[in-house]
Image (cartoon, helix red, strand yellow):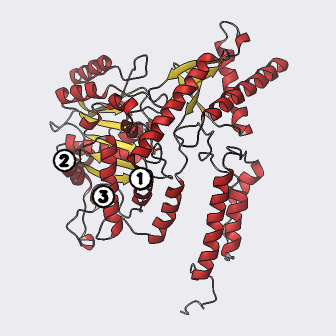
Amino acid sequence: MALPRSSEPSPELSPEDFRRLGHRAIDLIAERLAAVREDPVRRPVDDAQRTRWASEPAPAAGREADAVLERVATELFPHPMGNAHPRFFAWVNSPPAPLGVLADLLASALDPSVAGGDHAATYVEHAVLGWLKTITGYPRDSGAVLTSGGSVATLVGLAVMRHVKSGGTDRAAGMRQVSSPAGTAPLVVYTSTQGHSCIQKAVELIGLGTDHLRRIPTDADFRMDLDALRRQIADDRARGLSPACVVASAGTVNTGAIDPLDAIADLCAAEGLWLHVDGAYGAVARLTDDTNTLFRGLERADSLGLDAHKWLYMPVECGCALVRDPRAMRDTFSVVPPYLRDDTAWPWFSEFTIQQTRGFKALKLWMVIQQIGLDGYRASIARDVALARALQARIRARDDFELVAAGPLSITCFRYVPPNAGAGADANIDALNRGLLDTVQREGRAFLTQTELHGRPVLRACIVNFRTTEADLDILLDTIADAGYRFSGLSRSVE
Ligand SMILES: *Cc1c(COP(=O)(O)O)cnc(C)c1O
């Protein structure tokens, strides 16, 4: 078989070409950074463009790298998700720290697999895992790995829970032993009605099934109701089931509610239940003085998940799973075939999680935490919380908005309720808020999403954004009121 001639397309770039393309790419990013405040948050994608992107056939022949890069510049960059913008208030998505963007470039240039082994990236990940323990106040000697995000962190935590609760028998015996060591009673997991969807996915994936996931009601502040939890555990025991684990939230995605962690930890200790804390959004807010005490008890969790691509402003993806007992974590995942036997005394990360080959996610954390320091994070997170308070004060002060939930962190749930809406008009107001949201999202001056509380839709603004200012809050509310006014006029004229 003939080797390809050197003139045939190959991935290789000369150092000169790499430099030219690299300058173009960096210029593109810098221009976007300079224009981010003036650009629309999002631009609508039209149907033809959607189809062109999604159905493009794979090219048989290659083309110049410059031309490919230009496609990114002209086709893709005009259609960002929008999270870099100061007026992006949707879900829990932060802007990427610009130094983190460069870190991802450098990380892929180094391109190690951080499965483990004796090279720089391994020790950089150990460093940042230690820093994340400092930030959250979690024990220094716990086991930890970076993950793709909070969902996999939850799955890792619950997999260790299953291993421990099955008395270590689950790995060999599989589902036959996913029950109490006594042998027959299925394990039951508890979370609140506000718990994230990833908890259900994890319970399904570890084989317990949603029939064994209990959704505990919440109090007026959307925190897990401890008495209801206690009653449900007793009930399940009486029915011969085996209560195994509480998944508490340290910052729910709907309102930012933080479950009473210390009291839940007491209950788990008394009842012999595993405590997993989902801190994907909120756990890093433990850094700030204003919200610090809300997290009391988090350090007692058997396992903890958090997301650095939320309130630590990392580019997607970067999460972290922490498990108090590192031996249990290793026992859950470790399979070391002969070709992986070790070149160092340090255990490999791949023994503590699902992935074997692992990217160098740690570099962005290592660089940005050095850049702004824990004090910088403390100030920035506190500022986001203060902005949420300022938004809530504005909503209270206006006669065309209604505050529905002011969470303890940086999420605000509210409704547009024009003064002439009239009494008993809930259905109209719900339709109005749904309709205006669509208009706001299309027009791109601000971007937010909705959720449902007490069975009714609400607008929801989350601030995990170092670019947002008070002026942006005024623009947000004016934009919503303007769209609401037009939408209600429109629906009146249609009737
Ligand atoms: C985002 C989030 C998750 C899921 O994390 P991913 O990074 O999206 O996988 C879980 N719980 C809460 C509270 C979250 O905010």
* Figure quadrant of residue 2: bottom right
Determine the secondary structure under disc 2: loop
Circle 3 is placed at which residue position? 126
Per the model, the C-alpha gap separating discs 2 and 3 is 30 Å
Mark 1 or mark 2: whose residue is earlier in sequence: 2
Badge count? 3
Q: In the displayed structure, does residue 246 sit left or right of residue 66?
A: left
Q: What is the residue that sits farthest to the left in this orientation? A: 182
Q: In the displayed structure, does residue 237 sit left or right of residue 362?
A: left
Query: At label 1, which amino acid type do we have?
Result: Ile
Query: At label 2, which amino acid type do we have?
Result: Thr
Determine the secondary structure under disc 1: helix
Residue 172, position in %: x, y?
Answer: 21, 52
How would you rate the neighbour count of disc 3 (Cα within 10 Å): few for under 14, some for 14-19, many for 20 or more?
some
Q: In the displayed structure, does residue 401 sit left or right of residue 168?
A: right
Circle 1 is placed at which residue position? 369
Query: At label 3, which amino acid type do we have?
Result: His
How would you rate the neighbour count of disc 2 (Cα within 10 Å): few for under 14, some for 14-19, many for 20 or more?
some
Circle 2 is placed at which residue position? 169
Mark 2 or mark 3: whose residue is earlier in sequence: 3
Residue at 32% across, 25% down: 260
Residue at 44% across, 71% down: 110
Residue 93, position in %: x, y?
Answer: 53, 43
Residue at 62% across, 79% down: 17
